[in-house]
Amino acid sequence: MIPFNDDPFGIFILDPECLEREVAEDVLSEDDMSYITNFTILRQQGVFGDVRVGWEILSSEFTDGLPPMIDFLLVGIFPSTVHLQPHMRRHHSGTDALYFSGVEGAFGTVHPKYHPSKNNSIANFTFSAWVIPDANTNGFVIAKDDGNGSIYYGVKIQTNESHVTLSLHYKTLGSNATYIAKTTVTKYLEENVWLHLLIVLDDGIIEFYLDGNAMPRGIKSLKGEAIIDGPGMLRIGAGMNGNDRFTGLMQDVRSYERKLTVEEIYELHAMPAKSDLHPVSGYLEFRQGETNKSFIISARDDNEEEGEELFILKLVSVYGGSRISEENTTARLIIQKSDNANGLFGFTGTCIPEVSSALGGFWS
């Protein structure tokens, strides 16, 4: 038997024709389409299978993008009891928003090739997820167990009328016990308002963030050198054996391979590009045999005087056996000067032309 080879599912790049694009924020008529541009993603080499690729737009200082990550909602396999809810996505985004009903079996699973660890231990990561929990949720956003009654790691959220508790369940090298690091914050949940959960592990320290800010008493010590990992089942929306199910919406559930810096956490949480562009993220699906797909980005108009602005568009995640190339995966998107950033000339007040003598006249 000869295994798959030579990337039969494809290698993704941005079309070299669209590595630099410009859009105008100000347009003078309804027929002026200069505030819109498009990007084309090419699937090179193999065209086997149905595959998906994710992209996002970042501020200009992130020319290399954020660190490599696993996008769990992109790579997860979900039953029909987990519902796609496009109308509930965060307004500036184009990635999947999924609703978890909490009924038995309503959770996703992740194939082992997409699990974060490759060497049976995890010493650093940043976990990030956007959620709208149902009232009195008490369930795992993500969890991995060994199939023998022991959990490797899991992120759980518990809510009530006035508090949110975020916890990291984990097992460390050389110990059979499961430890729980958690912190609680006063938070009155509003209907249909997204919460941003973020947990960082680095150098034996666990840090909890909620909505971009460090949580009070949210720094904990790892009870060991690293989290142990191994063969097992990784679930999205449930804990061990499919119990302790999460109820509510999830979007952009990700694990970055290292601790994010303060600047990277701000970029991930605030997504500054959203005030200038729409959308700032999305997925494209390629059916078997399809080799190119395009998507549209538009500039958002506002009344601020702004100079030329630069953003970075990057391919960030794949699913279905394909991979992202090492070249031509980043594009520059320039928004032209807007709202008369160089000034606007005109008369103010009452303007009366000067009148000369009877010999002649001129306009001043």
Image (cartoon, rainbow, N blue to C red):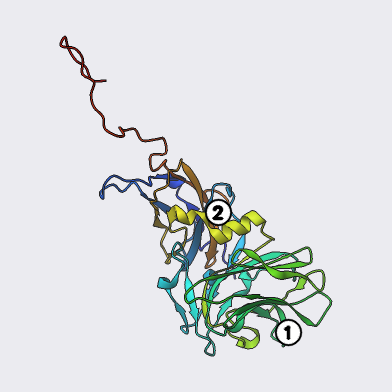
Q: In the figure, 8 relative to 242: above or below? A: above
Front-lying residue, 148 or 206: 206
Q: Please, what secondary structure does the residue beneath circle 2 have?
A: loop
**Horizontal side of residue 339 vs 170, given as left or right:** left
For the residue carrying disc 1, how many other residues have a C-alpha within 10 Å: few (<14), some (14-19), or many (20+)?
A: some
**Horizontal side of residue 44 vs 32, given as left or right:** right
**Of label 1 and label 2, which has the lower sequence position?**
1
Which quadrant of the rendered structure holds the N terminus? bottom right
Which of the numbered marks, if any, corresponds to residue 325?
Answer: 2
* Real-space Cα separation, disc 1 to disc 2, in angstroms: 37 Å
**Residue 323 visible:** no
**Residue 81 visible:** yes
In the rendered image, residue 255, in percent from the top left (x then y), is placed at 63, 66
Q: Please, what secondary structure does the residue beneath circle 1 have?
A: loop
Q: In the figure, 86 relative to 299: above or below? A: below
Q: Indicate the amino acid at tag 2.
A: Ser
Residue appearing at x 19%, y 12% in the figure: 357
Residue appearing at x 40%, y 53% in the figure: 300
Which of the numbered marks, if any, corresponds to residue 150?
Answer: 1
Q: Residue furthest bottom?
A: 104
Q: Indicate the amino acid at tag 1.
A: Ser
